[in-house]
Each structure stands twice: as C-alpha cells, then as structure tokens.
Amino acid sequence: MPFTFLTALPAQTTQVEADSIVLERMSGETPPYTIYAKDGVQAAGMIIETAAGEAIELDYTCWVYYYENANRYLIVNESNRNLLEINAKSDAAPGNLAAWRAIAVGKPIVPILIGKTYMGSMSNYDVPKQYLVITTSDDWDNLLTAVPSLRESLIETNIDFSNYQVIALIDQQYRNGGWTIDITDVTEYADEIVVTVENLQKGNALSVVTQPCHIVKIPRSAKNVRFQEIDIPMMDYSLESAGTACQWKNIDYDNKVIVINNSNEELGNYISCTNGGPHTVGPPMLLASGRTNYGISQISPKLQQLYPGKYTLNVEITLNNTPVTQEWCIALMVQRTLSEENIELIVTTKP
C-alpha cells in the first residue's frame, strides 16, 4: 500500500502537538535528517499523488509535513490527530521547500577531551577570544606555538587529523577567577555541526587574570561547524565605577531593556554624577529595569542566545517579605553588539 493510517488520539491538534506526533513517528529514522513543515493549517481539498499513481484528496484541515529523503508526506488531521503517511510520486515534491519550516533532527556527537584549563595558564599571552575548528597539523602547531603554556594542560597533542578535527574554545580574559568556558553539546545535522557553548562557572572573588579554554576532538567532517552560545558572559557595571555620587536617571522601570553600544555620551543620558563621570562604557552595555511589589533580596540575570540574532535576558528576582514598591535597575557589559529589537526581557520573581 502506498499509504498507511496510524492509531489516532482524541483532542484538537495544535502545531506543537502536530510536530510532536510527526517526530515520534520519525523516531525510527537514523539522524541526521530534516523534516519540512508547511506554514499554518491547510484547508481541506489538498491532493497528493502517490507513488502508485493514486490521487489522494484530503477532505479535512490538517498540518502538512514532508520528508525529502523518502519523498514522503506526513499529514496530521487537525481535529483528531490522525496521522496519514503518503509515499508520493517522484515529481510530487513541494515546489519551494525553502518556504517551508525546517525541523532539523540531529545526531549527538560525543567529543573527546584534549584539554581544559580553568585559571590563569594563558594570562601571559595576548590571545583574543576565539572559537576554532582546526583540521590540519600546521594550524594545530600554530596554536600551541602561540600559547606555549597551553601544551602543559593537554591530555594529547599528537592528533590524527585524517580521522579527527579539533574544536578549541578560547574565552576572553577576566579579572577574577572561577570562570570556565564549556562545550556542553555537539550535534550533527544534515548540513552542519552545531557546537553549544556555555559558561557553566561565572567567576568568584579571587583577584587574578584568567582566560579559560576548552579543547576537544570530534570525527572529521566536511560539514560546516556553527558555534551556538547559550549563556553569554556578562560583567556587572556599578554606579560606583561610573564616578562620584552617581545615580540612574531617565529610567522608566517598566520591564524594559536599553542597549548602549560603547558610547560615553549615550551612557550619560542615563547616569548623572556630582563629580565627573560617567566613565567610558567599554564593551556594549545592557540596561534593564523594572519594579516589584515587595522588597528585593537578590537579582540574578542571564543572557542567552536562542538562535542567531535573537536573545533573551532572563532576570530572576528573589523577594523578601516587605510589602513595598521597589524599583530595580541592572547594568551588564557584554562582549557583542546587540540591539533592543532582538532582546526579549523575561522577569521572574520568587520568594
């Protein structure tokens, strides 16, 4: 038979539920692969010609998916979650898959640790923050020559580049200890390998210059490697560092993010000082503010990249039991250029 019905579940189907139904059905396929989803619910009347030459007309509204590797349509009935699979005729593929939403299913890659240094070993060298994909012995030797102390922390230095490639993360320099940079996930997709980067440890009170790094090897591949930062390193900017007797001004306290991209003049729009200041921003700054109905014990911010060009600033506020309207404002310096349009502020409170 060119098509099959699978057992249905009751209830109306949302797009998220339809995605889950299709992905569960596809769980037996070997990743990496990509499924394409047609935008929005499709009206009744869609016709698909099967590999056997039969014309199947869908007389119900549905979510439509296409698996290019097998030239197969997967149709989820919007009203009852029925899943219909149709092996389509060779020329029955969608005309413009680029307009369909791609759902990439990846294959996990387990990286092999080469070395990880947590504090100070690179601080005597002027090495900028960088994420490297090293595929040749020459490039590998160049890195070890540029940073001689790095070699001391490596588990291995003789890499078989005919079978492996090296992923090296070198973070920025920090003026305190306790920082790490971490490869937390490596996943191979149909057209790329995605390396997830986080800072699992974000500093302590130790006054020392540090520059963390994390180096691994993975099987050699011709696919492009894309680095995806989840938690983006930040440094607090305090009013004490701005000048003498400084205070915030022109702040609305309405759960809003302001981006100041390395402009002392722009910073002066939001800080007033009785004696000098504010001092030069340096890296770009995020200025977030809001108000609560109780006193505040602690504010914990986290900047995350959802995907290229889209970020969330998650601010978790710990409240105390004092019933009072309290305004809050935090300033965070980040090592990248951002805009207010691509940052979503998410504020959560807890007792």
Image (cartoon, rainbow, N blue to C red):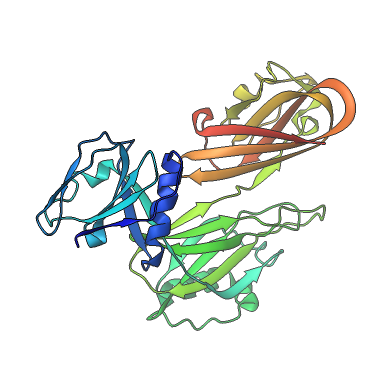
Give the left or right position of residue 342, taking residue 325 as reference. left
Residue furthest right as drawn: 322
> Residue at 37% of width from left, 64% of height from top?
32
Q: Compared with residue 343, is residue 235 higher up or lower down, i.e. above or below? A: below
Residue 200 point in image, percent of width and height: 67, 57
Residue 42 point in image, percent of width and height: 28, 36
Q: Is residue 99 visible?
A: yes
Give the left or right position of residue 28, taking residue 278 as reference. left
Q: To which quarter of the image does residue 279 belong?
A: top right
> Residue at 64% of width from left, 25% of height from top?
267
Residue 176 point in image, percent of width and height: 76, 53
| In front of the other: 220 or 47 | 47
Residue 192 point in image, percent of width and height: 37, 60
> Residue at 57% of width from left, 76% of height from top?
114
| In front of the other: 142 or 129 | 129
> Residue at 50% of width from left, 53% of height from top?
228
Q: Compared with residue 167, is residue 68 higher up or lower down, i.e. above or below? A: above
| In front of the other: 88 or 301 | 88
Q: Compared with residue 18, is residue 227 higher up or lower down, i.e. above or below? A: below
